[in-house]
Image (cartoon, grey):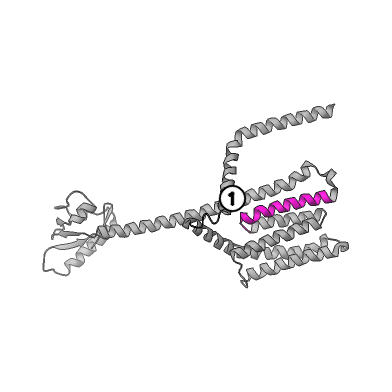
Amino acid sequence: MLSESVSTTHVAAALILLSFHWSMTHVDVLKFVGKLGQYARQNSGGSAHAGNGDARRISAAMEQLRENSYVETSKLMVHVNGMSMVIIPFIYDRGNAVFMVGILLAAAAAYATHLAIACDKIRLRAQQLKVFVAAYYAITVVCILCGSGFEHMRLMETGQITLFACYCDSTVHVPGQAALALAEIVCIAASSGLQSVSVELVAAPLLKALILIFSSVVLESTMKEGVAAQFRGADAESMVTSFRTMLKGLSDAELLLDESLQITDDDDLLRGALVMESLKGQVFSNLLLPDTEEQDRFQKFIHRQKAHPLSLREERLHVCEFPYGQAVLSV
């Protein structure tokens, strides 16, 4: 009777906690699920986005990023695979020599591949990397199904987390992590029997896989947003440069100065494009921005021109380099 009371209390408390949690977080959860669905549609609908230039640029940049980052990752994975080859003989007993040799061969193959990549002997392209990591997942699934024991499962768990940490591609990690969780559940059921399979035993691998899947999707989405932001910044800079070039062409007008540097005539294009009022009678140096460097540069130009007598007492300045208000004036 007491156990039933405790159980009922526990269920009631759990329901209250879950209700409170859902009321506080359901909006964020629904938004996150919506983003996951949108992200899945973007990844699965490659043909639908084939005509999108921005999507193609981001996809190409992500592939290049994966290729370059895996070279650095391989330099670390060489040590991980080497240590695995040292540890494996101590984990598995002599009675299971065939299985131990199989895992050693898999670790040796991974070690050789990562060593070749780290030493720049080979370079795997984006699609080759995807196949390589998918094969790694398949080998890990086979190892989980064929092995047993606490040490063996901890080694497989380390491999599962390593796969997630070393390569960022949710199209591989989502099915791969789901397959690993399913293989672990099948292994538990096969070794302990269906009657001994409890919610706790099933929830542990599923929760681990879900965390890694969500982390993979969020990480890749964040990286794509960063790449997209870089492209937007580069595009904006290109537009600004083009606008400056266009403005320079529009503002290539002339000002006619007398010997006292007063404006005696201003170009109609200058008045229409840069200013609305006439500049006649104003001293040109007073129109420059209050920048010591620009003022000094203008004075040097004037001294240089005075050193070469002109047939006329008037000088023309073109709008280009001396900053006038928000416009750019020069000689």
Question: Which residue: 85% across, 43% down?
Answer: 195
Residue 212 appears in the rendering: yes
Q: Is residue 167 left or right of residue 256?
A: right
Closest to the observer: 180 or 79?
180
Closest to the observer: 328 or 65?
65
Q: Quadrant of the N terminus?
A: top right
Q: Quadrant of the C terminus?
A: bottom left
Question: What residue type is disc 1 on?
Answer: Ala
In the rendered image, the vertical position of residue 198 relative to residue 137, given as above or below? above
Residue 262 appears in the rendering: no
The span shown in magenta is: 167-190
- Percent across and percent down for residue 167 are 63, 58
Closest to the observer: 298 or 213?
213
In the rendered image, the vertical position of residue 57 relative to residue 41, given as above or below? below
Per the image, is 286 magenta? no
Question: Which residue: 16% across, 50% down?
Answer: 278
Q: Is residue 131 left or right of residue 259?
A: right
Question: Which residue: 68% across, 66% down?
Answer: 78
Question: Which residue: 71% across, 55% down?
Answer: 160
Please count the marks in the image: 1
**Residue at which label 1 appears:** 40
Q: Is residue 170 left or right of residue 300?
A: right
- Percent across and percent down for residue 75 are 64, 65
Q: Secondary structure at mark 1?
A: helix
- Percent across and percent down for residue 309 are 14, 69
Give the main secondary structure, helix, strand or loop, of the magenta stretch.
helix
**Please, which residue is most extreme toward the bottom here?**
121
In the rendered image, the vertical position of residue 225 relative to residue 23, given as above or below? below
